Amino acid sequence: MNALFACPARAPRRRGAALFAALVLALAQTGAWAQAALETVRFQDYPGFGNLLVRIAISKGYCAKNGIECKLLVLPSSPMGIQGLLAGSIDAALPSVDAVNQAVLRGSKMKYVAGGAVASSMELVAGNHWATPHAAEGFPAFIRDLKGAKIGVPGRGAPNERYMSMMLTQAGLDPEKDVTFVAVGGATTAYNALVSKQVDAVLSYEPMGSIRKVLETCKVLWRSAFDRKPEDIFAINGGANGTVFLQDFIDRKPKIIDSVIRLLQESETFVNNPAHFEEILRIDRPYFSLEMPRGDEIMTASLHVALDANMYRAHMSRKAMKAALDLMLASHQLPKVLPVSDLILDRAP
């Protein structure tokens, strides 16, 4: 009797449990259950190594671990990142502090919540055809070697031209009379202009220096991340580009902001462990390749430079941010600067 009545009573429970287990397995296999719990956050990316901390967070699972589905959208400048943020095409931009200062001055409400790519990567490179007898003497001696040179900058009136003008003035040269500025675009087109002797020197960005190291077709005179003079330019390292959200997003989704901070900190730990160097290259290769001779070697050298410069950090230095703003004000690139506390979240690392 007991056996006769026990079987019908247990069978529905076994069938129900089996059906539930099958449903759980199906949801796990399709990702539907996992994805339903994740909040999508769209981050600005740049060409090159770009937003490396977020790329690593996606690959290593730090985004999902913190309840976020991270997506990247390439917007290749700070102004474009700000525009994308205001237009709603991204949730998090990676702009320079001067761009954020300008946006807030114009009435937009946004703040840094963490760092990202915090070191300055400007590099002054001269062609092998141009004599630089004082290169080993440091600043300002090597600047005087550029008298009469055609100097390439990303665009006329761009910050690089202002920085170059400042260095020329400090070295006793007149940027209006002693050199000629030429717009040469990004690092690749700048390099082509240099080796074809359309310009004699270029104030561009990494990987210009790594191209020089691998191909030996030009010479690096100065790097803003490593050379301590001029002091006012070196002081901006640590506060260059960070992760910015609109204030409305910060107010509505404080837990998501906290999750973003955590995943960036986890990525920082991973990226700055020398044992992970080759894995970082593998992770980044789908995002970044150089279509030029020995491109993989240049990419490897460029990552070494970035890591040596403490580029990829979740911490945003308030002192460096102020130095950057003060420099922009002194070089007439900004009409007014705001207190740093107006531009960064109080709990940002």
Image (cartoon, rainbow, N blue to C red):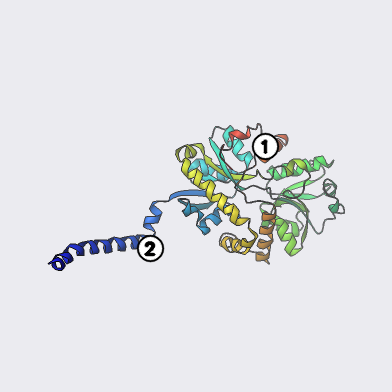
Callout 2 amino acid: Gln
Residue ID for mark 1: 322
Q: Residue at x 77, y 42 (%)?
A: 231
Could you say whether the residue bearing mark 2 is in a helix, strand or loop?
A: helix
Q: Residue at x 68, y 58 (%)?
A: 304
Q: Residue at x 81, y 40 (%)?
A: 170
* Residue mark closest to the camera, 2 vs 1: 2
Residue ID for mark 2: 29
Q: Are marks 2 and 1 in contact (CB under 8 Å)?
A: no
Closer to the camera in the image, 72 or 253: 253
Q: Residue furthest front?
A: 2
Q: Earlier in the sequence, mark 2 or mark 1?
A: 2
Callout 1 amino acid: Lys
Taking the image as shown, residue 122 lies to the left or right of residue 68, namely: right
Closer to the camera in the image, 256 or 153: 256
Query: In the rendered image, which quarter contains the N terminus?
Result: bottom left
Relative to 96, residue 297 above or below: below
